[in-house]
């Protein structure tokens, strides 16, 4: 059985980057609420369009909608472990995830919290690019993407996210502090929480994550 992991942290903390590196290294299925909702948006479903408008304004999509989509995804892809990028975002979502896993006779292995300064967040968000098709995340300064903004995995367009606007980012940071930071104490109680300094180079962060996962899988 492969690990069941949630990656948590502020916008721009590197969750998407580390999730991509984990799934390539360990072959664990990965998703995020954003990935699932982008699929719904591209399909033009009422749920997808409503959620997209909420995200553009910096708000969080309701717990009920997110949990339902995550449970559906788990039923299809989560039998051999998973990595959730940015889920759960609230204590209610975390409680519901525990209930879902209990029904499956499983439990969460790791809640990895990427700690970053607000300065790091703003610097990274200012140069962030994301594939509109698959959600791959990179930056203007990485591998020449400024000259050729095309995803290396699916050839989709690399674009600036609507919610990376400075004013929207401020709203997202406030939402993060009020709704997501309480997860620290929630996961500390379960002995699942591990804090990692996310201000560093992505490879240094990933080396620490590898050690955590390999230790849990022994």
Image: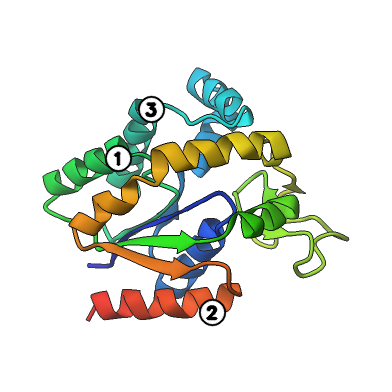
Q: CA distance from mark 1 to mark 3?
A: 15 Å
Q: Residues within 10 Å of mark 3 (few under 14, many from 20)?
A: few
Q: Is residue 124 above or below residue 196?
A: above
Q: Specify whether 125 is left or right of 102.
A: right
Q: Circle 3 sits in a helix, a strand or a loop, which is it?
A: helix
Q: How many numbered dots are placed on residues in this image? A: 3
Q: Is residue 146 above or below residue 95?
A: below
Q: Is residue 90 above or below residue 78?
A: above
Image location (x, y in percent) of residue 96? 24, 38
Task: Give the label, 1 or 3, closer to the camera.
Answer: 1
Q: Quadrant of the N terminus?
A: bottom left
Q: Residues within 10 Å of mark 2 (few under 14, many from 20)?
A: few
Residue 142 tag number: none
Q: Is residue 25 above or below residue 43?
A: below
Q: CA distance from mark 3 to mark 2?
A: 35 Å
Image location (x, y in percent) of residue 137? 63, 56
Q: Quadrant of residue 91?
A: top left
Query: Which of the two labelled residues, at mark 1 and mark 3, occupies the earlier sequence position?
Result: 3
Q: Which residue is mark 1?
A: 91
Query: Which of the two labelled residues, at mark 3 and mark 2, occupies the earlier sequence position?
Result: 3
Image location (x, y in percent) of residue 186? 25, 49
Q: Which residue is mark 3?
A: 65
The answer to whether residue 109 of the structure is visible from this angle is yes
Q: Which residue is mark 2?
A: 204
Q: Which residue is located at x 60 percent, y 54 percent?
A: 118
Q: Quadrant of the C terminus?
A: bottom left
Q: Quadrant of residue 119?
A: bottom right
Q: Specify whether 185 is left or right of 103.
A: right
The answer to whether residue 36 of the structure is visible from this angle is no
Q: Circle 1 sits in a helix, a strand or a loop, which is it?
A: helix
Q: Circle 2 sits in a helix, a strand or a loop, which is it?
A: helix
Nearer-the-camera pick, 79 or 90: 90
């Amino acid at each position: 059985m492969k690990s069941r992991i949630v990656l948590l942290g502020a916008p721009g903390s590197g969750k998407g980057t580390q999730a991509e590196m984990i799934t390539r290294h360990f072959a664990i299925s990965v998703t995020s609420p954003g990935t699932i909702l982008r699929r719904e948006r591209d399909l033009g479903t009422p749920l997808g369009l409503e959620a997209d408008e909420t995200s553009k304004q910096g708000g969080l999509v309701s717990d009920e909608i997110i949990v339902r989509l995550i449970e559906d995804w788990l039923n299809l892809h989560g039998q051999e472990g998973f990595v959730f990028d940015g889920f759960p975002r609230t204590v209610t979502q975390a409680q519901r995830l525990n209930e879902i896993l209990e029904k499956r006779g499983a439990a969460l292995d790791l809640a990895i919290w990427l700690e970053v300064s607000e300065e790091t967040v703003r610097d990274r968000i200012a140069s962030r690019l994301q594939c509109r098709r698959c959600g791959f995340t990179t930056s203007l300064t990485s591998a020449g993407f400024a000259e050729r903004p095309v995803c290396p995995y699916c050839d989709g367009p690399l674009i600036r996210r609507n919610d990376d606007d400075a004013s929207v980012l401020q709203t997202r940071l406030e939402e993060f502090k009020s709704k997501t930071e309480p997860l620290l104490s929630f996961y500390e109680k379960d002995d699942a929480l591990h804090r990692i300094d996310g201000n560093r180079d992505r490879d240094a962060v990933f080396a620490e994550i590898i050690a955590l996962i390999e230790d849990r899988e022994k």
